[in-house]
Image (tube, rainbow, N blue to C red):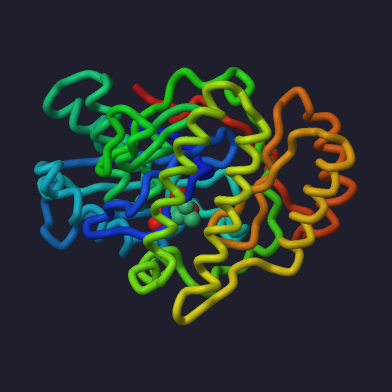
């Protein structure tokens, strides 16, 4: 069986967690299209107790990825009790270069969780209904928190929020009823620096436990969630953009006031932000930035402004990128089942 699953970009950021992978505030994201992982899962009854998982990333064995997959399988074992009865060969590929600085944990964990839920259907029966996707989201969350949002098309939310009916801390839910302007919103991911982050997301979440601004951050995230939900439903681009940019800068401000403090932005990240704000002020085009936990810039704009925005990106932003590399992505239809 095989699934492809896309990355996602958070609009309201998840930053800070409780055991086990429970977010301290609710988050919401766009599910992307081009930045994705394709995973094939082969399995056979396990003969040798020393052989369990053979993981190949882009055709090669990868010890660091393999050990993460092992740990994740151990955490999934309670929910997929057949896991220990089989040996697995997992082949995974990303649509983007591994060292580009684009996080692949959301796309890879969600693709793998979907393959295993598919395997469960094959072994035990069932259909790809709401519960199937909910379980895939639940398992993805255990693998990598934000991965649980990649299971759903267009817009997904994870974490309990008064602004979202049926929202849950243990899995993401699809958000319906958003304004059509967001159905194909563009996200150009500009690689400002592709080297590995100095401080991992895992460490970053942990530092929130002692961050003096954490309680106010969680309150602000909830009030931003209320505002962005209204903006997503009504198509209010001004409010949408203001919240999205506030969230990106708040995420990085939290890093700067952690103890020890750290900075993941690069000088060119700030330069990109300034260029985007100047272009917006000059042209009145609704173009905004967001960041994840790294230096690369996501540039968000409506599809009907693509021509002007792409021209601006080529002229003003690409000179600030590393190796002239960007992915022209957009909001998309979520994971795809590739076989059977
Ligand atoms: O899912 P993690 O543990 O890699 O954390 C993701 C954190 C952010 O990307 C910064 C925000 C988010 O909600 O995706």
Quadrant where ligand 1 appears: bottom left
Left/right placement of residue 30 relative to residue 193 reads left
> Going by the image, does 285 lie left or right of 114?
right
Most extreme residue toward the bottom is 260
Q: Position of residue 84 (x, y in %)?
A: 12, 50
The structure residue drawn at horizontal position 80% and vertical position 33%, both measured from the top left corner, is: 285
Relative to 205, say whether 246 is above or below.
above
Q: Residue 261: x percent and y percent?
A: 51, 78
Q: Establish if 106 lies above or below 155.
A: below
User: Could you say where residue 143 lies in the image, as x and y percent from the top left?
Assistant: 31, 52
Q: Tell me the residue at 81%/59% (across/down).
A: 320
- Residue 261 relative to residue 129: left or right: right
Please report the residue visible at 19 percent of the width from the left and 41 percent of the height from the top. 44
In-image side of 117 versus 197 (left or right): left
Of the pair 298 and 73, the residue shown nearer to us = 298
Residue 59 seen in the figure: no
* Residue 35 seen by the camera: yes
Q: Nearer the viewer, residue 303 or 169?
A: 169
Image quadrant assignment for residue 43: top left
In front: 54, or 208?
Answer: 208
**In terms of depth relative to the viewer, which is nearer, 284 or 100?**
284
Residue 273: image quadrant is bottom right
Location of residue 74 in the rendering, given as x and y in whole percent from the top left corner: 18, 56
At 61% from the left and 23% from the top, the residue drawn is 235
Mark count = 0
Q: Classify the position of the C terminus by image quarter.
A: top left
**Figure quadrant of the N terminus:** top left
């Amino acid at each position: 069986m095989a699934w492809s699953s896309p990355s996602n970009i958070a609009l309201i950021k998840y930053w800070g967690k409780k055991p086990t992978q429970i977010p301290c505030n609710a988050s919401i994201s766009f599910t992307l299209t081009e930045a994705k992982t394709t995973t094939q899962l082969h399995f056979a009854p396990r003969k040798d107790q020393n052989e369990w998982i053979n993981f190949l990333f882009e055709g090669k064995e990868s010890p660091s990825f393999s050990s993460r997959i092992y740990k994740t399988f151990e955490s999934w074992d309670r929910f997929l009790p057949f896991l220990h009865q089989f040996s697995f060969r997992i082949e995974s590929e990303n649509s983007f270069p591994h060292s580009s600085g684009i996080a692949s944990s959301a796309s890879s964990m969600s693709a793998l969780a979907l393959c295993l839920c598919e395997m469960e259907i094959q072994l035990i029966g069932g259909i790809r209904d709401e519960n199937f996707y909910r379980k895939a989201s639940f398992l993805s969350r255990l693998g990598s928190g934000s991965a649980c949002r990649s299971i759903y098309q267009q817009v997904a939310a994870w974490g309990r929020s008064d602004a979202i009916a049926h929202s849950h801390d243990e899995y993401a839910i699809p958000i319906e009823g958003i304004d059509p302007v967001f159905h194909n919103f563009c996200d150009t991911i500009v690689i400002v620096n592709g080297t590995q982050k100095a401080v991992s997301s895992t460490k970053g979440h942990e530092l929130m436990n002692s961050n003096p601004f954490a309680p106010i951050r969680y309150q602000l995230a909830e009030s931003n969630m209320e505002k962005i939900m209204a903006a997503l439903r009504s198509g209010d681009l001004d409010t949408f953009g203001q919240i999205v940019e506030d969230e990106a800068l708040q995420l990085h401000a939290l890093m700067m006031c952690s103890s020890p403090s750290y900075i993941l932005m690069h000088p060119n990240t700030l330069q990109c932000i300034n260029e985007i704000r100047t272009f917006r002020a000059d042209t009145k085009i609704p173009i905004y930035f967001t960041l994840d936990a790294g230096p690369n810039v996501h540039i968000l704009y409506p599809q009907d402004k693509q021509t002007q925005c792409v021209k601006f990106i080529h002229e003003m932003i690409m000179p600030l990128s590393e190796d002239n590399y960007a992915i022209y992505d957009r909001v998309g239809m979520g994971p795809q089942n590739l076989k059977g």
